[in-house]
Amino acid sequence: MKKLHTVLMTLALIAGSLFTQAQNANQDPVKLSFDLKVAELYTKYKTDGFVTYKGGNLDMQRNTEFPIMVELVEGRWYQFCVVGDPEAKKIEMKLGLEGVGDVITDKFKPEITNEHWTQFSFVCPRSGRYLLTFYQRGSKKDMLGHVAILQRPVKTANGSTVTYTLR
């Protein structure tokens, strides 16, 4: 029942946002595409039982790496979603840990893939401060960007603790 309530609330928020955007005939189609993708990803993972750990829009500049430090816990399951500017020529995302190096790297060109976002699941192998970097190359100076880090809840419905392991 709680899951259904969360889904209905999320859909109501999205519908309200879309209605407001539809009323604004001058809405930038690039910004609209960006906002819809962000809303879609949050809705998908909230429906799947994830909760938001960290997330937000970024004030990004072209050709400049945006660093984000994030404390991750061993055995926790995280879902990373990175949404770039739909007009970006290249998007690159890296997740690394000092002493280990880059754990995950994803590079792509939206004009080739027709996607301006990426997502991945990550079961943290070792607790620590991870560095997430987000980079976009493009022709405009200011770039749209959003990073969402979601996680599975620590406790199940019956109160037992959950951890995940890599095999």
Image (cartoon, rainbow, N blue to C red):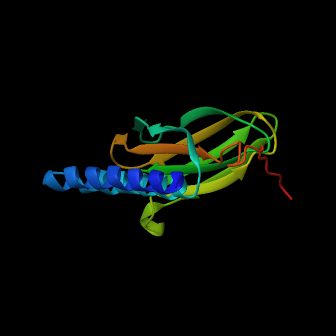
Q: Quadrant of residue 18?
A: bottom left
Q: Residue at x 44, y 50 (%)?
A: 84
Which residue appears at 79% of the width and 51% of the height? 164
Q: How many marks?
A: 0
User: Hey, which residue is sitting farthest right in the picture?
Assistant: 167
Can residue 86 be seen? Answer: no
Image-based side of 166 in relation to 14, left or right: right
Nearer to us in this view, 61 or 20? 20
Residue 7 location (% of width, % of height): 45, 56
- Residue 78 vertical position relative to residue 109 in the rendered view, above or below: above
Quarter of the image containing the C terminus? bottom right
Seen in the image, is 164 located left or right of residue 148? Answer: right
Q: Is residue 32 or residue 88 the one in the foreground?
A: 32
Where is 42 relative to 98, above or below?
Answer: below
- The x, y position of residue 77, in whole percent, is 70, 49
The quadrant in which residue 73 appears is: top right
Residue 133 lies left or right of residue 136; in this view the side is right
Give residue 15's position: percent from left, percent from top. 29, 56
Image coordinates for residue 129, horizontal then vertical, percent: 71, 31
Q: Tell me if I can see residue 141 in this picture.
A: yes
Q: Please tell me which residue lies in front, 55 or 131.
A: 55
Front position in the image: 131 or 18: 18
Which residue shows up at 47% across the image and 51% down it? Answer: 6
Name which residue lies at 72% across and 48% down.
Answer: 158
